Image: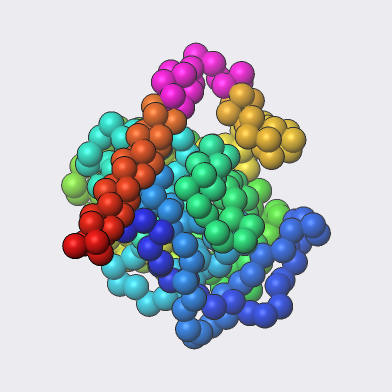
């Protein structure tokens, strides 16, 4: 697949609607039954990432939820750890390469995209927490129905209560905390049936990487919904874990906060995962540069012949 290919998202209303939760942030919401406009897709460590602003990411997810898609759609928040795993595992990489939408959830991924020539104005990282909250808030305008899948029963109940406290008009049609072990085929079928019967448009999946990414693909296929692999957002929004200060989020140091709060669980991810990501992104970029040079040389040789 060529680098910087175009994918489509919905047109948006000319007027942006300000977010109630932050007067300093505005997102655009998709207009119903409009044509599509292109957005840029950049390959980072062999995985296509949509280069867009956080507001356009909200519009993309809402647009997918509004479409009549019997096959569903899977959305993944890709950070350095996600892409380092994809570099090591061909099956996982293939799954992300064929996803409906991948977003840059991490400053390092956004920075790497800029190094390879992102031209979308304002394109930056898309924080999972912010995407979750913004889609739920904006979904109130469209009657979007949400299903929460993941974490523990206590956390997922707290998450539902917190979302309804912030957004009273939000429609939360189901919550579920699946067992930590792998589901049987019958259990997966029953889970998909429950989600279909709930009428959910979007299923937010918080099961940890890479389990949640595989679950999102299965739910999109089996339940015909938009399934978003949202990572640790469940714990943060429910208040189960503290978020990094804003200045750390903006400076790319959010990982330091997470590591300091859970060093025994996360040391391997950040020590080896981040290094692997940088190497994979550099290796892929170098291969692209070499291939382009070879093609240019061949073109010049044909012109001189």
Residue 34 lies, with reference to residue 230, above or below; the image says below
Indicate the colouring scheme.
Answer: rainbow
Is residue 265 inside the magenta stretch? yes
Is residue 137 at least partly visible in the picture?
Answer: yes
Q: Nearer the viewer, residue 276 or 162?
A: 276
Residue 153 lies, with reference to residue 205, above or below; the image says above
The image shows residue 248 at horizontal and vertical percentages of 70, 32
The image shows residue 111 at horizontal and vertical percentages of 55, 42
Horizontal arrangement in the rendering, residue 16 relative to residue 51 (left or right): right
Farthest residue in the top direction?
264
Residue 127 lies, with reference to residue 141, above or below; the image says above
The image shows residue 61 at horizontal and vertical percentages of 49, 63
The residue lying at 38 percent from left, 77 percent from top is 68
Horizontal arrangement in the rendering, residue 81 relative to residue 126 (left or right): left
The residue lying at 31 percent from left, 54 percent from top is 296
Q: Nearer the viewer, residue 241 or 99?
A: 99
Query: Quarter of the image containing the C terminus?
Result: bottom left
The residue lying at 46 percent from left, 35 percent from top is 80
Is residue 98 at least partly visible in the picture?
Answer: no
Farthest residue in the right direction?
23
The residue lying at 64 percent from left, 30 percent from top is 253
Q: Which residues are magenta?
A: 259-275
Horizontal arrangement in the rendering, residue 26 relative to residue 12 (left or right): right
Query: Quarter of the image containing the N terminus?
Result: bottom left
Count every numbered label the image shows and give the total.
Answer: 0
């Amino acid at each position: 697949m060529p680098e910087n290919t175009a994918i489509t998202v919905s047109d948006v209303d000319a007027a942006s609607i300000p977010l109630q939760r932050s007067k300093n942030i505005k997102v655009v919401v998709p207009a119903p039954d409009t044509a599509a406009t292109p957005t840029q897709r950049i390959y980072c460590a062999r995985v296509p990432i949509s280069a867009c602003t956080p507001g356009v990411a909200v519009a993309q997810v809402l647009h997918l939820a509004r479409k009549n898609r019997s096959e569903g759609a899977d959305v993944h928040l890709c950070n350095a750890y996600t892409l380092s795993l994809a570099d090591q595992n061909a099956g996982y990489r293939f799954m992300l390469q064929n996803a409906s939408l991948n977003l840059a959830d991490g400053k390092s991924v956004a920075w790497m995209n800029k190094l390879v020539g992102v031209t979308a104005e304002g394109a930056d990282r898309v924080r999972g927490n912010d995407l979750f909250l913004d889609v739920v808030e904006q979904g109130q305008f469209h009657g979007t129905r949400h299903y929460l899948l993941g974490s523990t029963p206590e956390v997922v109940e707290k998450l539902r209560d917190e979302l309804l406290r912030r957004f009273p008009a939000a429609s939360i049609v189901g919550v579920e905390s699946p067992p930590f072990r792998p589901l049987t085929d019958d259990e997966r079928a029953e889970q998909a049936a429950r989600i279909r019967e709930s009428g959910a448009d979007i299923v937010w999946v918080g099961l940890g990487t890479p389990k949640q990414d595989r679950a999102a693909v299965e739910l999109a296929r089996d339940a015909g919904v938009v399934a978003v692999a949202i990572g640790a957002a469940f714990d943060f929004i429910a208040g189960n874990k503290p978020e990094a200060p804003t200045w750390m989020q903006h400076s790319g140091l959010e990982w330091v906060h997470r590591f300091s709060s859970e060093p025994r669980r996360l040391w391997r991810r950040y020590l080896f995962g981040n290094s692997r990501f940088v190497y994979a992104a550099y290796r892929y970029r170098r291969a692209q540069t070499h291939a382009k040079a070879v093609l240019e040389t061949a073109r010049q040789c044909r012109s001189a012949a």
